[in-house]
Amino acid sequence: MKKLLTTILSLGIAASAALAGDLSLTAAKVSDKLDAVNVDSAVWSKAKFATVVLYPQTAIEFNDKEAIEANKDNKGKKAQVAAVHNGKEIAILVKWADGTKNVQGIKCTDTYSDGFAVQFAGATKKAQPLPYIGMGSDGRPVVVHLQKATEKVYEPNGNKDVSTQINRQQTGVFEKELADFDAKVASLANTDFERVFVGEGFRSLTEIKDKSVKSNASMKYNDKAWSGALSRSLKDDYMNASGTVPVAIAVWDGTKHGRNGLKLLSSWVAINLEGQKANAAIVAEATEATKGDAAKGKEAAEANGCNGCHQLDKSVPAGTMAPSLVNIGGYSTAAYLRESLLKPSAVVVPGFNRNAHSNTPWYNLEKGKRISTMTDYSFLDKKTVEDIVAYLKTLKAEVE
């Protein structure tokens, strides 16, 4: 019986690995201007939707007991994604289910909003492998567009409206004058929380405030689901896209204290621009299906001590010696997993978990460069590496 169960498990892992290739979709070519597109724009009738699965990001456990409890049983979530382009601009529409509407207010510090983000691979001088999801990696930047659901926020709204930066109860005006004051404040309020960031690795994410990136984002809640739209230029100081545009999608759930790295995240999705020649290298990297034997990869991962530092199974408590990998297969490409095994210092996450002992850092500094303390597995034969990659691609939450 034990042998039969082992065989069934092996077959199941192998089947999952065979289906592990990620997604590409096509952005329909349109003649419309896209700079003011929102979730209700008519242009979306020309687009085709594709299903993109978002997985819980679980690299580092938050020091937040309530958040840990709220997210302990998180599953993957299906989002519907569509895109259009006009040769100069691209617009992306994301739809995802959310049973509760959470809008960020200004009265509490312990409430969180729903939101979404679209990440693009930034411009590089020469062709590079796709950056690390979420924050980019050294020499491989990402541009991240973040939109949160917010109430009207007057101060700070960025306009330095000093004359009306006082509480209405301290104005010294009454009746119509007070009503006029309230109306002026309301007219100055900002209802749009849209931010754009650039990053080349953990802790490098920086907001772009010089208005050099032209974009427009919006969100709408209806029938227990959000729709989020983003439009931006294909080329600017930070991005130079044509043929194929690699993107990653993220969503936050305010009910579950979602913020920062506590989110659902997709792997890279290759968006091919209709009417242009697709970038075969980007498509291949974003959609690569694993070639190895996942069952043998599991054995090899354990034999080589991967589970000594990394959490590979949720049945085992999260450790502090290395990032958790329980969902790594959901939001990482095979190419990234392979690179992590062969060149562990190519992407280094922030310093060791704050709960970890100082004798178990995640990296050391050598001549100002972060060198991962993870073993360099380039000594393994190619087949074993591919088997481990195949196994790691199976590590992902069940999809609801």
Image (cartoon, rainbow, N blue to C red):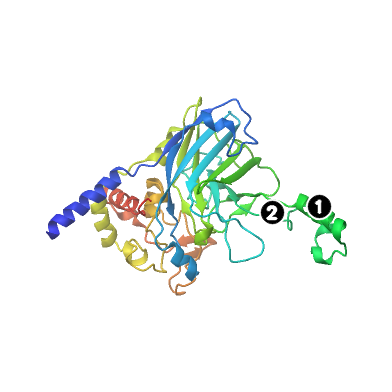
Farthest left residue in view: 1
Instruction: Identify the residue at image location x=65%, y=54%.
Output: 151
Along the viewing direction, whichever of 13 and 336 lies nearer the viewer: 13
- Which of the 4 quarters of the picture holds residue 24? top left
| Residue 66 % position (x, y) | 49, 68
Q: Position of residue 131 (x, y in %)?
A: 49, 47
Of the numbered discs 1 and 2, the one sitting upstream in the chain is 2
Three-letter code for the amino acid on which mark 1 is drawn = Lys
* Location of residue 219 with respect to 4 vertically, above or below: above
**Residue type marked 2:** Lys
Query: Mark number for residue 184?
Result: 1
Between residue 315 and residue 354, name the one nearer to us. 315
Would residue 304 be found to the left or right of residue 135 on screen? left
Q: Is residue 114 visible?
A: yes
Residue at (69, 54) in percent of width and height: 152
Furthest toward the front, the residue is 175
Q: Which mark is residue 152?
A: 2
- The residue nearer to you, when weighing 61 against 354, is 61
Classed neighbour count for the residue bearing mark 2: other residues with Cα under 10 Å, few (<14), some (14–19), many (≥20): some
Alpha-carbon neighbours of circle 1 within 10 Å: few (<14), some, or many (≥20)? Answer: few
Relative to 239, 280 lies left or right:
left
Q: Quadrant where the N terminus lies?
A: bottom left
Q: Is residue 141 visible?
A: no
Residue at (56% x, 59% y) in the render: 203
Q: Are marks 1 and 2 in contact (CB under 8 Å)?
A: no
Please state if 312 lies on the left or on the right of 57 as rendered: left
Residue 4 against residue 31 in the figure, above or below: below
Residue 6 location in percent, x, y?
A: 18, 56
Q: CA distance from mark 1 to mark 2?
A: 13 Å
Q: Position of residue 186 (x, y in %)?
A: 76, 52
Mark 1 lies on a secondary structure that is: helix
State the image quarter where residue 174 is shown. Answer: bottom right
